[in-house]
Image (tube, rainbow, N blue to C red):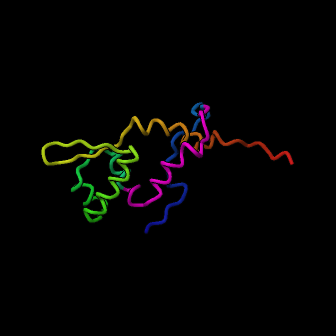
């Protein structure tokens, strides 16, 4: 498994203007997405689909997993509504569900944008 440093992860947003108030508990909003994508193979599949629609055979080749494992991860992502599928004849194509992703994006920005991190000191 490759080692990733925090510097390798692209930031969602880096300006203070993107620090909009988020209704609700940030952790509660972001937790389901982060939990789902904490599995390395699921994250690889999601990242691949973020580059565009793919069929299962393309996903298998790209992530180097057996068809049954790819199908399992796709089912988990689909049940969480992070991806969607469409059937065309005998082929099923998968893509990122951008509408669902838009619901958690503000919470992710608020949690991971350095400009949004408070620099306040503890009072005690």
Farthest left residue?
A: 89
Residue 63, given in percent of the width and then of the height, sits at: 31, 60
Relative to 9, say whether 85 is above or below: above
State which quadrant residue 16 falls in. top right
Which residue lies at the image location 43% right of the left edge and 39% below the top edge? 101
Does residue 38 appear to the left or right of 93 in the view shown?
Answer: right
Residue 8, given in percent of the width and then of the height, sits at: 50, 55
State which quadrant residue 28 falls in. top right
Which residue lies at the image location 12% right of the left edge and 44% below the top edge? 89
Relative to 43, say whether 18 is above or below: above
Residue 24 belongs to magenta span: yes
Which residue lies at the image location 26% right of the left edge and 59% below the top edge? 60
Farthest right residue?
A: 124
- Magenta segment's dominant SS is helix
Residue 116, given in percent of the width and then of the height, sits at: 64, 39
Does residue 91 appear to the left or right of 68 in the view shown?
Answer: left
Which residue occupies the foreground of this view, 34 or 10? Answer: 34
Question: Which residues are the magenta region?
Answer: 21-44
Does residue 36 appear to the left or right of 84 in the view shown?
Answer: right
State which quadrant residue 30 falls in. top right
Which residue lies at the image location 29% right of the left edge and 64% below the top edge? 65
Residue 84 belongs to magenta span: no
């Amino acid at each position: 498994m490759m080692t990733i440093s925090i510097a390798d992860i692209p930031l969602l947003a880096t300006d203070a203007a993107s620090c909009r108030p988020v209704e609700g508990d940030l952790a509660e909003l972001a937790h389901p997405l982060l939990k789902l994508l904490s599995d390395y193979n699921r994250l690889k599949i999601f990242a691949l689909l973020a580059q565009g629609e793919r069929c299962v055979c393309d996903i298998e080749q790209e992530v180097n997993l057996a068809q049954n494992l790819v199908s399992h991860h796709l089912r988990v992502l689909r049940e969480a509504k992070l991806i969607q599928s469409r059937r065309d004849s005998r082929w099923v194509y998968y893509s990122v569900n951008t509408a669902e992703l838009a619901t958690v994006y503000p919470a992710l920005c608020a949690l991971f944008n350095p400009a949004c991190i408070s620099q306040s000191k503890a009072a005690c």
